[in-house]
Image (cartoon, rainbow, N blue to C red):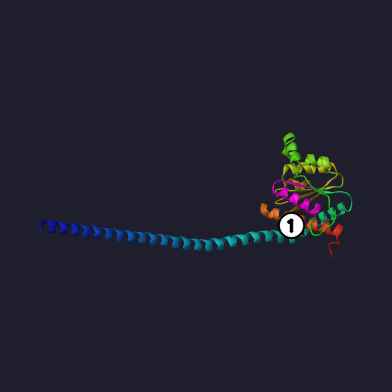
Amino acid sequence: MTISIFIISISIAIIYINLNIYEFQRRALELVNYNSEIKIAKSLCYAYYGIISNIILGYYMKEYIKDQIKKSYETKIAIYENNELLSKIEQVAKLCVELYRGKNKTILAGNGGSAADAQHIAAELVGRYGFDRPSIPSLSLTTDTSNLTAIGNDYGYDKVFSRQLEGMGQDGDIFIGISTSGNSLNIINAFKVAKEKNIKTVALVGRDGGEMAKLANFAIIIPSNSTPRIQESHILIGHILCDIIEKEIFGEGIED
């Protein structure tokens, strides 16, 4: 009897333990499933949020891009409709063509983005713009790091262009100074040297033209106070000058 009771007790204990293990497993599985569902729900929320955000951001970003293009277009339209400004661009183009029918050159300089524009325009003339032809002499004063650092160190940054122009500029050359503000001191100093050496000066500027517009023989002032819009218009005018020079000197003229 005692043995039977013991066996029955052990059996009941084993059944109880197995039931508890089953319950633990069931609850653990439910918890795993619950966490998985939460994770899936979170993932769906993040994905939905990402899609909505991209749609909204994409819309506003596209509108912003369109607005930037529109502002650039409006600046160029302002130039297009300004007969006085167009006449100055025409005068400078004719001056450059006349210069290149002789043995002179254009010299350019600027700071920052305007330095890049100076190099860009010079490269279009020395290399090619629209078609193969002999090289056209043009010099950017922004490319020789030895000159820039030596002059800057010995004389000051405000002399980095005037000193180079003093050495390399010749009577009859054209110096094109590029500045969005028109108040770059190193360009202003170069204009003063240019006057002493009988070098014609062109101020490619923006805003109110600054001091450069007052000193230059020709001032092309972009009708904008925005630096990006001014720079975009500067390179447009630079390309127009290159195009006219190339076609007039080595092509069949711009009438064709």
Q: Does residue 175 appear to the left or right of 26 in the view shown? A: right
Please give the range of residues in magenta.
107-127
Q: Is residue 123 above or below residue 45?
A: above
Please identify the quarter of the rendering in which residue 183 is found.
top right
Main SS, magenta residues? helix
Q: Residue 34: x and y, percent?
A: 36, 61
The x and y percentages for residue 40 are: 42, 62
Q: Is residue 30 magenta?
A: no
Residue lying at the far top in this picture: please name it.
154
The crowding category of the residue bearing disc 1, from other C-alpha atoms within 10 Å (few below 14, some 14 to 19, many at least 20), is: few
Residue 218 in sight here: yes
**Picture coordinates of residue 182, whole percent (x, y):** 72, 47
Q: Would you name the residue on which mark 1 appears?
A: 236
Q: Residue at x 41, y 59 (%)?
A: 39
Q: Nearer the viewer, residue 15 or 207?
A: 15
Residue at image position (46%, 60%) is 46
Q: Quadrant of residue 171?
A: top right
Q: How many marks?
A: 1
Q: Residue furthest left?
A: 1
Which is nearer the eye, 174 or 129?
129
Q: Secondary structure at mark 1?
A: helix
Q: Amino acid at mark 1?
A: Leu
- Residue that lies at the very extreme toward the right in this rendered image: 102
**Residue at 20% across, 57% down:** 13
Quadrant that contains the C terminus: bottom right
Viewer-proximal residue, 186 or 23?
23
Q: Quadrant of residue 45?
A: bottom left
